[in-house]
Image (cartoon, grey):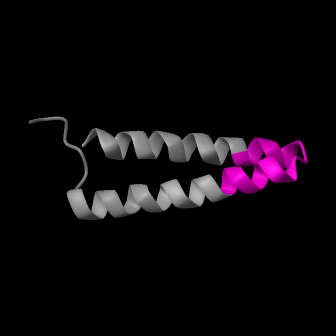
Amino acid sequence: MGLVIIFALVTILAAYGGYSSLKNKNFLAAFWGVASFLVFGWFTVMTIIESGFPTGTH
């Protein structure tokens, strides 16, 4: 279940990186930030659908 949390954190950081690079007009970094956001966001959503949301208990 830790995989969902890691994917979600990477998704959040990629969104922030893509947004900040767009503000700075760094379009190559913005492309990779948005692409990472889309890929890891998709992994996060599909992992939650397949494995369920982590509950914190064993």
Main SS of the magenta part reads: helix
Q: Is residue 24 magenta?
A: yes
Residue 8, position as x, y percentages in the image: 44, 45
Image point 49% across, 57% down: which residue? 41
Q: Magenta segment: does it hold 46?
A: no
The residue most toward the left is: 58
Question: In which quadrant is the N terminus drawn?
Answer: top left
Residue at the image point whose x is 34% and y is 46% from the top: 4
Q: Horizontal and vertical percent for residue 49?
A: 28, 64
Report the magenta residues as a range.
18-34
Q: Is residue 56 left or right of residue 20?
A: left
Residue at figure coordinates x 65%, y 58% from the top left? 35
- Residue 58: x and y in percent read 8, 36
Q: In x, y percent, where is residue 55?
A: 19, 42
Residue 2 drawn above or below residue 34? above
The answer to whether 32 appears left or right of 52 in the picture is right
